[in-house]
């Protein structure tokens, strides 16, 4: 869920009028034991790409997405159990330009570097996933106070507490500037809803 793009210039994505899709898309690449591995590429050379579709699986123009369309694998935190963060791709601030119903499609890409240092992406055929439909509504229809638990997940909390930058959807009072204290970005009072599942490639 999110709100459409506000064409004004704002440094804060929430206070500007638009709400990034929440919970933020977090993709994990997993090896399927029932399939033979067909590609051996270092994680550092992989990137995940997001594209937008209608609920009927019609691809939409890239201009409908505001924010990063490609992200590289999440850097490993300096933790004893760093393996728990392996193979994650995090889209922290993705805003959709118009109200409506959509799906995300995520593609895995190989990153090549040209002689002049430019990065070039090439999709790996057959490695992708598509989300269930979700809604983009006007900000006043988000009811942030009531729906805040459904706009965040336990995985978001876990990653954020270990240094991954993610934004918590604010309440209406916070959006209107009625809260003087800064937001605590490390202790979001949210839980993963029972029907929420992380999307896996």
Image (cartoon, helix red, strand yellow):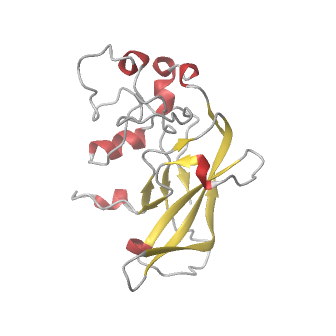
Where does the image place residue 169, in percent across and percent down from the top left? 42, 30
In the picture, measured across the screen, residue 44 lies left or right of residue 58, that is left
Where does the image place residue 125, in percent across and percent down from the top left? 64, 73
Q: How many marks?
A: 0
Task: Looking at this view, name the residue that lies furthest to the front.
Answer: 8
Task: Looking at this view, name the residue that lies furthest to the bottom.
Answer: 115
Quick check: can you spot residue 75?
Answer: yes
Where does the image place residue 144, in percent across and percent down from the top left? 48, 22
When asked about the image quadrant of residue 118, the answer is bottom left
Considering depth in this image, is 123 or 42 the residue closer to the camera? Answer: 123
Considering depth in this image, is 200 or 148 the residue closer to the camera? Answer: 148
Q: Is residue 102 above or below residue 52?
A: above
Q: Quadrant of the N terminus?
A: top right
Where does the image place residue 28, in percent across and percent down from the top left? 48, 58
Considering depth in this image, is 55 or 194 the residue closer to the camera? Answer: 55
Residue lying at 51% horizontally and 56% vertically, measured from the top left = 69
In the picture, measured across the screen, residue 59 lies left or right of residue 116, that is right
When asked about the image quadrant of residue 112, the answer is bottom left
Q: Quadrant of the C terminus?
A: bottom right
């Amino acid at each position: 869920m999110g709100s459409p793009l506000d064409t004004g210039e704002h440094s804060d994505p929430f206070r500007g009028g638009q709400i990034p899709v929440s919970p933020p898309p977090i993709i994990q690449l997993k090896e399927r034991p029932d399939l033979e591995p067909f590609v051996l590429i270092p994680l550092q050379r992989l990137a995940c790409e997001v594209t937008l579709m209608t609920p009927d699986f019609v691809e939409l123009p890239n201009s409908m997405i505001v924010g990063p369309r490609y992200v590289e694998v999440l850097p490993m935190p300096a933790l004893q159990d760093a393996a728990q963060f392996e193979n994650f791709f995090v889209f922290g601030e993705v805003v959709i330009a118009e109200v409506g119903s959509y799906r995300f499609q995520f593609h895995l890409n190989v990153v090549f570097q040209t002689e002049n240092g430019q990065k070039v992406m090439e999709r790996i055929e057959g490695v992708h996933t598509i989300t269930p439909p979700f809604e983009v509504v006007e900000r006043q229809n988000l009811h942030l106070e009531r729906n805040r638990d459904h706009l965040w997940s336990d995985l978001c909390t876990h990653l954020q507490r270990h240094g991954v930058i993610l934004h918590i959807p604010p309440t209406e009072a916070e959006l209107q500037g009625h809260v003087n204290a800064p937001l605590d970005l490390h202790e979001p009072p949210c839980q993963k809803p029972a029907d929420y599942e992380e999307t896996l490639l």
